[in-house]
Amino acid sequence: MSDRRGAVVLGASAGVGRALSEELARRGYDLVVSARDAEDLDALAADLALTQAVRVVARPLDLCGPTENLERYATECFDSLGRVEAVLIPAGAVADGDSGSAPSGVAATLVGTNFLGVATVAGAFVERFEAQDRGTIVLFSSVAAAAPRGRNVAYGAAKAALEYYGRALQHRLAGGGVGVQIYALGYVDTGMATGRATLFPPASPQRVARVVVDGLGRGRRFAYLPRYWRAVVFVLRRLPWPIYRRLTF
C-alpha cells in the first residue's frame, strides 16, 4: 500500500469531479475515482497514473444503485488504497422538465442521485473516518437550494436536503477529528450548465477544484463558489415575491 495521502472522488469522469481528481493527483494523492461509466473512468485513471505518478483505482458506482453497494463502497475504497483522508462527492444530475409535475421516475432519480445516494455513501465514510479519528467529507450543494425555481424543483429540493444533512453531520461530529465541508456551487462550466440561462458567466471546474482542495481539512464548514454567490443569495432571499416570481434565471 502507498504511504501517500488517499482520497476518493465520486462523479470523477467529468466536470468538477474530473477537475478535483486532476488537482488531487497533481498534489500527490492516491485516488479512487468513481462514476457510472466504467470506460471513462478507466481512461481517467490511466491518464492520471501516467502523468502524475500516483496510484489511481477506477471503481464504477451508481448512486441510484442497490443500497448495499453504496454501504460497502467506503470499505472497498479503504481496501484499495489502505489510507483514505478525504471523500469528495460532486456527483449529481439535472433533468429537463423538472418542474414539479414531471413523471415520478424523474423526481426519484434526481433525489436518489443528488441526495439519497450521496448521504448513504457519506454515512459509510463517517463510520470509517470516526474509527481512525480523522478524515474530511466534502459535499456539494447548489445555489438552487437557496433560491428555489420552478424549473428545477426536485433537484433544488434534493440539494437543500443534502445541505441540511451536511450541517447536521457537522453538529454531530463537532469537536472530533472528522470534518464535513459543504460547497454550494453557482454556475460552473460543465455539461449540466449547457444551454441554460445564467445570471453570470460560469466558473471553470479547475478554479472550483483549486479552492476546494486548498481548503481540505482547514475547518471551513460552508462556502459559496464562486464566492460572490453569497451576496447574490442574500439579495435573492430578500426580494419581494412579486419581483422574485418574475425572474427567469
Image (tube, rainbow, N blue to C red):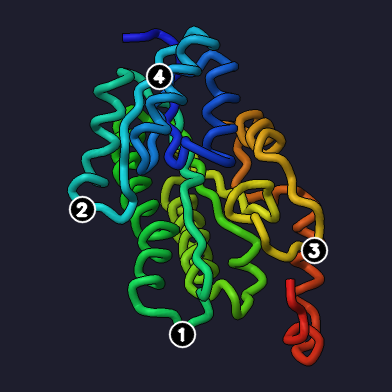
State the separation of the CA atoms marked 2 and 3.
38 Å
Task: Give the mark nearest the N terminus, 4 or 3.
Answer: 4
Q: Tell me if I can see residue 177 in this picture.
A: no
* Disc 4 to disc 1: CB gap under 8 Å: no
- Name the amino acid type tagged 1: Ser
Left or right: residue 228 compared with residue 214? right
Quadrant showing the C terminus: bottom right
Hey, which residue is sitting farthest bottom in the picture? 242
Location of residue 217 (image quadrant): top right
The label shown at residue 204 is none
Q: Secondary structure at mark 3?
A: loop
* 176 lies above or below 5: below
Residue 66 bears which disc, if any? 2
Which residue matches tag 3? 199
Instruction: Report whether residue 15 is seen.
Output: yes
**Mark 4 neighbour density, 10 Å: few (under 14) some (14–19) many (20 or more):** many
Q: Quadrant of residue 206?
A: top right
Give how far apart the Cα atoms at labels 1 and 3 are: 25 Å
Instruction: Indicate the amino acid at tag 2.
Output: Pro
Q: Position of residue 13 (x, y in %)?
A: 47, 36
Question: Residue 169 placed where, x, y %?
Answer: 44, 52
Among the two numbered marks 4 and 1 on one chain, the one whose residue lies closer to the N terminus:
4
Callout 1 touching callout 3 (CB < 8 Å): no
Q: Residues within 10 Å of mark 1 (few under 14, many from 20)?
A: few
Residue at image point 42% right, 39% down = 10
| Residue type, label 4 | Val
The residue at 78%/92% (across/down) is 242
Crowd class of label 3 (few under 14; some 14 to 19; many from 20; radius 10 Å): few
